Image (cartoon, grey):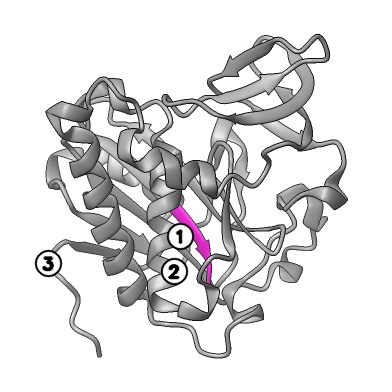
Amino acid sequence: MIDRPKWLHWLNTCPSINTWAIDHAAQLRAGDVVFTRRQTAGRGQHNRVWYAPSGVLTASFILDRLPVIQRTGFSLAAGLAVIYAVEDLLPDLQGQLRLKWPNDIWLQERKLAGILCEVSSSLSSRLIVGVGLNCNADFSQLEIDQETIGNPISLHHICPVIPDEIAFLTAIRNYLLQAESVLSDRVETHLGLGKLLPEIRRRDAILGKSIAIQTAMEQAIGRAAGIDDQGRLLLERSNQSVKPIVAGHITLLNRCNAR
């Protein structure tokens, strides 16, 4: 049996690990990771159901140093951390993973992973970064339309040998702590995503695509015109005006052209 690091809280089963991390904030330290192989009631963005059959790596990472000003758009920085971790462990995937704003990771135009960042209600300084990464997942067992859950793909569809869970958790944790350190630097505190922004933009999966986006206030249609320094999506409307979007659910209007 592989030794488990001291920062790892391994749960046999759990409805939602992000909820568990929020409820047990007093027992957790910065840098801790909560993990389960069986999450039964996962949550995604905007309280959508997060489907996690066996083989989805589900973990919550505890960060305590990130200034409030840096939290907008951090799901993109977290997504970049997951991409780096996957590419380190599976070098054949170098350059193939993309970020779909605001919180998904794509491989071959399909959803490989999702991110959910939440603030602890009892410790306002604490950010909980939930990650769901499809490692050895069979989504056909869910008996649900694949498009409904983002047309998912699993690493085992592409790579014959998948690293173990501890390797993934360690690598993702290391890169998240690096991202936190970069964005917590005093020089960076007024620069949004700062040094991470060029790489985030390079990985932008929907740049130039026609999209519909549902926000809390409206549904808007336009062209994805990039990501600003705060991690907001830039939506170019038909009149060529550009509007920054903080949060919303995206539908590609021409799915076959998505990268």
| Residue 7 numbered mark, or none | none
Q: Distance between the residues labelled 3 and 1?
A: 24 Å
At label 3, which amino acid type do we have?
A: Lys
Residue 24 shows in this picture = no
User: Between tags 3 and 2, which lies in front?
Assistant: 2
Residue 2 occupies quadrant: bottom left
**Is the residue marked by circle 3 packed among few (<14), some (14-19), or many (20+) residues within 10 Å?**
few
- For mark 2, what is the residue? 86
Q: What stretch is highlighted in magenta?
A: 131-135
- For mark 3, what is the residue? 6
At label 1, which amino acid type do we have?
A: Ile
- Please state which of residues 202 and 222 is positioned toward the viewer in this rendering: 202
Q: Which of marks 3 and 2 is nearer the N terminus?
A: 3
Percent coordinates x, y for residue 47 in the rendering: 57, 33
User: Between tags 3 and 1, which lies in front?
Assistant: 1
Q: What is the magenta segment's predominant secondary structure?
A: strand
- Please state which of residues 47 and 253 is positioned toward the viewer in this rendering: 253
Q: Which of marks 3 and 1 is nearer the N terminus?
A: 3
Q: Distance between the residues labelled 2 and 1?
A: 5 Å
Examine the structure image and report whether residue 252 is included in the region drawn in magenta: no
Residue 235 occupies quadrant: top right
- Identify the residue at horizontal 57%, vertical 17% (top origin): 244
Residue 26 shows in this picture = yes
